[in-house]
Amino acid sequence: METIDSGKIKWIDISQPTSAELEMLALKYPFHQLNLEDCLSRIQISKIDKHQSHSFIILRFPSISGHRSALSITVDQLSVFIGQDYLVTVHHAEFGPLAQLFQSCRNDKNLMGQSTGFLLYKIIDGLVDELLSTLGHIERDLDAIEDAVFGGSSPVSIKITTLRREIMTLKRTIIPLRRVIAELSTDIERFANGLDLAPYFSDVKDHIEKVLEELEASKETVEIYKDTNFTTSTERSNKILGLLTILFTLTIPVTVLSSFYGMNIEIPGTVQSGPWDFFGPYTTMMLVIAGSVAPSLVMLWYFYHKKWMSF
C-alpha cells in the first residue's frame, strides 16, 4: 500500500491486495463489504456502484503479455474507490501507465490536480491510450498473416484463429468499458470540485470509439484472410489431387498390359508360342514398352490440350 497526499486529495494505491489491507481501508472509509470483496476477485465485470459519499468503479483493460514469439492478450482488473478528497486504486496486475503516473505525482504533487475526478480522468486516459499499442500488435499480426496467405509460404490457419480470438477478447472487454465511461462522465461531476470534466471524459470516449472501430475493421480483415486462406488451400489441394490422378491414369496402360503377361495363358511373345525376334532378341520388350508408352503419351497430349495440366 502506497499513499500520496497533496494536501487537498489523497491517492492510495494497493498492488496485489490482501484481506488485511482491505480491512484497514474498511476501518478508515465507509466502503461496502461487497465492494471490498470485489477487489479481491479477478473475474468481475466493468461496472460502477454509486454510494452517498463515494463511488466504486471496476474497469477492465486488455494488455499484451508473454514473450515476443508467443504474445497473447490478457485482461486485468482495476478497482477504484473515489470520494471527495480521496482516490483508492486496487489492482492485481501491474498497469504501466498507472505506475508511471503514480511515480510522477509522487515527484510533483501538483500533477494530481485539484480534484479526485480530474485525477481519475488522468488514470483512465493513460490506460485507454495504452490500448493503441495493443492495436499496433493486432496490425502487425494482420500484416504477417497477409504475407503468409498471399505468399503461400506456410500454413496460417492457427495464426488466423488465434488473432480472431484476440480481437473478440478485446471487443468483449472494451464494449463494457465504453458503457462504464459513459456512465462515469455524468457521475464524476460530484467529485470534480467545480471543474467541468465533461470534455475530458468525452475525449476518452472518443478514443474508445476509435479503438472499437479499428477492432471492427480488423475483424472484417481477418475474416477476409480466413476465406482467402481456405480458398487458396483448397486450390492447392485440388492441384495436388489432380496431378496424382493424372499420374495414376498414366499407369493404367502399363498395368493392363502387365496383367495380361502375368496370366498363365498363351499369348504372343510368351514361352509357349516362342519368342518374337523380328526386331532382335528384345523384340517382345520393345513391343511391350511401345504398347505402354504410346497410350500414355496420347493421354498427356489430351490432358494438355484440355488444359487439365501445364508444363
Image (cartoon, rainbow, N blue to C red):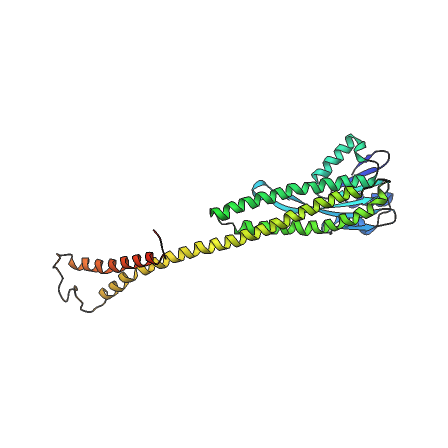
Residue drawn 65% across the image and 46% down it: 74
Residue 150 image position (x, y, % from top left)? 49, 48
Q: Is residue 17 visible?
A: no
Tell me which corner region of the image, top left, top right, bottom left or bottom right, holds residue 199: top right
Residue 15 image position (x, y, % from top left)? 74, 41
Q: Nearer the viewer, residue 78 or 21?
A: 78
**Above or below, 202 relative to 258:** above
**Above or below, 83 relative to 236:** above
Q: Is residue 46 left or right of residue 261?
A: right
Residue drawn 73% across the image and 49% down it: 178
Residue 33 image position (x, y, % from top left)? 83, 50
Q: Nearer the viewer, residue 224 or 54?
A: 224
Q: Which residue occupies the extreme front position in the image?
A: 305
Q: How many circles with numbers are drawn on the protein?
A: 0
Q: Is residue 142 visible?
A: yes
Q: Nearer the viewer, residue 143 or 2?
A: 143
Q: Is residue 212 left or right of residue 227?
A: right
> Where does the N terminus fall, quadrant-wise?
top right
